[in-house]
Image (cartoon, grey):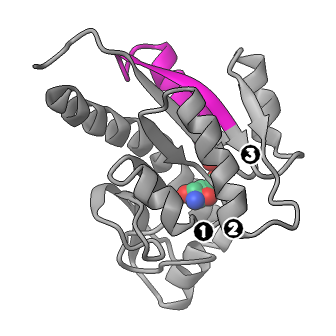
Amino acid sequence: MASESRRFCIAILISGRGSNMMALADAVRDGTISNAEISVVISDQPNAAGLEKAEERGIETLVIKRGGRTREEHDHEIIAALRARHVDLVCLAGYMRILSHEFIEAYRGRILNIHPSLLPLFRGLEPQKQALDHGAKTSGCTVHYVDETLDGGPIIAQHEVPVLEDDTVESLAARILVEEHKLYPEAVKQVLTQLHQQA
Ligand code: GRF
């Protein structure tokens, strides 16, 4: 039975700046993403700048460090934190770790990632540099479901940006980031609409 009033709990995983996390938090706050709340922001890095920004917004934050443990042990603690908060959707936003099979299996179809290229082009690290090195005329950003492949899960949405003659990695990254902040809320809204229909 469809339930219009069901509020979905979103967790956002970060490792750094957290600008995409803030874009999502803004979209939830202003109602662009409705029937949802940001339940928790989790960082593997204690110094992630995004943590303070989330706290300023009154969002619960957790630091769960890898701390010499295996990927599985680390993810196990994260999964427990997500389950304790009844999280429905996990959004990776600059989270710089590969997820274990257990994590992906626990939330299959409910983990999203944003990547600053037009996937399947330029997977992995430094995609903006890869785009420049390959002489790409356009690039952009992609939100996709996370599966066991690196930046290879099913694509949800993309925005394109031009690559300019005099672009540096920084100027291209900045142009893409503007689009990321629009794309991620759009994609989350789309996914939550589907989850509402399934609920
Ligand atoms: C973004 O470019 C995102 O696409 C990539 O890492 C960066 C994170 O930036 N996965 P921020 O922490 O959201 O500001």
Residue 66 percent location from the top left of the image: 80, 60
Can residue 115 be seen by looking at this rendering?
no
Tally the marks: 3
State the extent of the magenta-drawn residues as a range: 20-41
For label 2, the SS is helix
Q: CA distance from mark 2 to mark 3?
A: 15 Å
Q: Residues within 10 Å of mark 2 (few under 14, many from 20)?
A: some
Is residue 28 a member of the stretch shown in magenta? yes
Q: Is residue 80 above or below residue 176?
A: above
Residue appearing at x 61%, y 79% in the figure: 129
For label 3, the SS is strand
Q: Earlier in the sequence, mark 2 or mark 3?
A: 3
Which quadrant of the view contains residue 98? bottom right
131 left or right of 34? right
Most foreground residue, 108 or 138: 108
Q: Is residue 23 above or below residue 142?
A: above
Q: Amino acid at mark 1?
A: Ile
Residue 43's disc number: 3
51 left or right of 36? right
Contact, mark 1 vs mark 2 (Cβ under 8 Å): yes
